[in-house]
Amino acid sequence: DTEVTQTPKHLVMGMTNKKSLKCEQHMGHRAMYWYKQKAKKPPELMFVYSYEKLSINESVPSRFSPECPNSSLLNLHLHALQPEDSALYLCASSPEAGSNEQFFGPGTRLTVL
Amino acid sequence: AQSVTQLDSHVSVSEGTPVLLRCNYSSSYSPSLFWYVQHPNKGLQLLLKYTSAATLVKGINGFEAEFKKSETSFHLTKPSAHMSDAAEYFCVVTSTGFQKLVFGTGTRLLVSP
């Protein structure tokens, strides 16, 4: 299995909802990443996990809460989001946090009403 | 700090004509450089990467790029464009420590019949 999968593909939520995004890889990679991508912009790094521990948090608001339950799975818990948080959320993985190449999933399109 | 500059926000070509997408980089050390492609509402796919081996790098779908240290450039080329090449292309450099990818602002490639 050489891909990163993300669920759901699309998510619509209200500002008071709690939801989660899920990312999974079975390539044995030990680093996983969350990115946020607004329309017509490059992806912006949010979080980096290395060996299931959070190693980088790019000053992301606490309404975004990452979780890495095991080496194959990465979640992003969402609570009290704002409409400006609507974006494509991309997950990626790499063999190690210092590896050159990251493999991206297809993304979750999030709309906050 | 490492950075990349994509010199064109949009490039338009006709099907069957050559493609040139320009990228200049800034790095205090020998960088790793990548080109990623993103089709509409999709994740990012790696086209090719340079990691200090051969300066001419061949990638998928007929794309190639040449690392020119003297010009600090890493331009992406393809001899003959296909309609399916229409997408957003990102030039990327690794940050110090390699944990982060630093993205250019992207170039949208338009291919007309």
Image: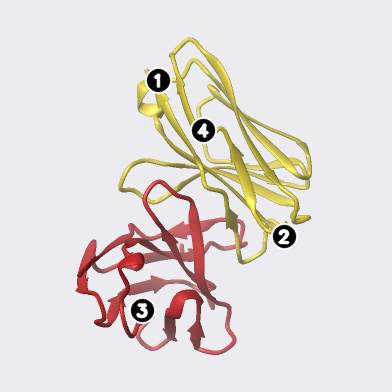
Residue for point 58% across, 83% down: B52
Which quadrant is the C terminus of chain B positioned in?
bottom left
Circle 2 residue? A95
Q: Secondary structure at mark 1?
A: loop
Residues at marks 3 and 4, common chain?
Answer: no
Residues at marks 2 and 3, common chain?
Answer: no
Q: In the image, what residue type sits under mark 4?
A: Val
Whole-percent x and y of residue A32?
66, 47
Which chain is the one coloured red? B
Dot placed on the residue nearer the N-terminal end, 2 or 1: 1
Circle 4 residue? A60
Image colouring: by chain
Q: Residues within 10 Å of mark 3 (few under 14, many from 20)?
A: some
3D distance between C-alphas at marks 1 and 3: 38 Å
Circle 1 residue? A82
Circle 3 residue? B75
Whether label 1 touches label 3, CB < 8 Å? no
| Image mark 1: chain | A
Q: In the image, what residue type sits under mark 3?
A: His
Whole-percent x and y of residue B109?
28, 65
